[in-house]
Image: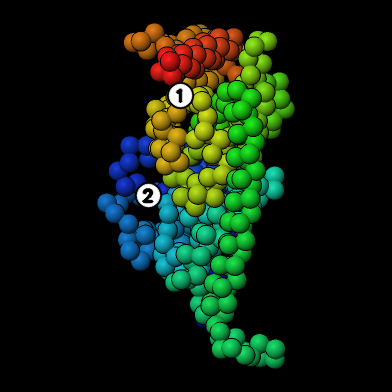
Amino acid sequence: MFDRHQGGDEAVLVCLDFGDADYADSVAELKELASSAGIRTLAVVQGKRSRPDPALFAGSGKVDEIGETARAYGAQLVIFNHQLSPAQERNLERRLECRVIDRTSLILDIFAQRARSHEGKVQVELAQLEHLSTRLVRGWTHLERQKGGIGLRGPGETQLETDRRLLGKRVKLLKDKLATLRRQRDTQRRSRERAGSLSFSIVGYTNAGKSTLFNALTKADAYAADQLFATLDTTSRRLYLDDKSNLVISDTVGFVRQLPHTLVEAFRATLEETVRADLLLHVVDSSQESRDSQVAEVNKVLHEIGADTVPQLLVWNKIDLKGIAPAVERDEYGRISAVRLSARTGEGLGLLRSAISEFVADRQNERKDAVTGQSNLDN
């Protein structure tokens, strides 16, 4: 009989190279994710494979190496920088005799630690339970034990069936709560639209400096830290550019490589602010060598949630770390496409405000033209 190990706060990381161009960045990112979760990295086991092994994900020899490394360091936790199937997790735990989790479980754990608002906690719990539900199908042996003993005899339901039924009820309850919160957000959004407010959303890769920029623009005190997923709960504030401006800007959760689909689905209500925005301020850490791939990852998630058609303004942040001068970049049509700045020092912040003002003016002219055109048609 096999029960899951409890694990610990010290781990051996496993990163296998399947020929991805950003492999080195992915390894560094896993170390940051582990640190953000409060886990101390003892060692990193690396290797190359052409494809995952169906039973163990890594080859048998590599699994033996992982086991030897874990025993040498006394680690009770092994984290794979990949998505494992329930069967692979179970097989690896039996073989390694310690707790094994994948990248998805690690990110979910970080989100669980960071969630502060009621909505954020509901979203994270839903994502965790939907991830766990796949682990109940072909998972751990103790979940398949027949219930028995005083007070437990009865319908002949196995523990696995009970767990599955209770989990399903909890998932339904959480989805109902999120549906209510979504209706509340829709009401608030329609109210802003009736008032003629333009809505901006700050998006970007995790730790790109979104919350720092949000605070600099709005004089807010949203939590900002040099760590992955410092912000989970969406915060909205009025943005004042001049007496005539009526703008609302929102700080949103950061994205990351291989963002778990269950998280994207659970946070869909929050991300609706992004889908319905008039403009996305796409913040990029310009000091990162992998900035282009990070932009691509963010755009991939935006496409998944249906926000890929929303106009974007690229904000190249942290120019102070590279000694780059603040500047504005324009496309072939003369429209501002990017702004280089430092949210931390304030360099280039005025250029971003001017860029936003220019966008607002263009949008207001479009609305006037649309009204004029409709009036001409009516006449």
Disc 1 to disc 2, how far (Cα)?
Answer: 34 Å
Q: Is mark 1 on a helix, strand or loop?
A: strand
At 55% from the left and 83% from the top, the residue drawn is 158
Residue sitting at the far left = 50
Q: Is residue 343 above or below residue 235?
A: above
Q: Is residue 192 above or below residue 40?
A: above
Residue 59: image quadrant is bottom left
Residue in front for this viewpoint, 277 or 7: 277
Residue in front for this viewpoint, 5 or 208: 208
Mark 1 neighbour density, 10 Å: few (under 14) some (14–19) many (20 or more): many
Mark 2: amino acid: Leu
Of the residues tagged 1 and 2, which is closer to the observer?
1
Of mark 1 and mark 2, the one earlier in the sequence is 2
At 39% from the left and 27% from the top, the residue drawn is 292
At 60% from the left and 45% from the top, the residue drawn is 182
Mark 1: amino acid: Gln
Q: Is residue 344 visible?
A: no
Q: Name the residue under label 1.
A: 312
Residue in front for this viewpoint, 94 or 186: 186
Picture coordinates of residue 149, whole percent (x, y): 66, 91
Picture coordinates of residue 222, whole percent (x, y): 69, 30
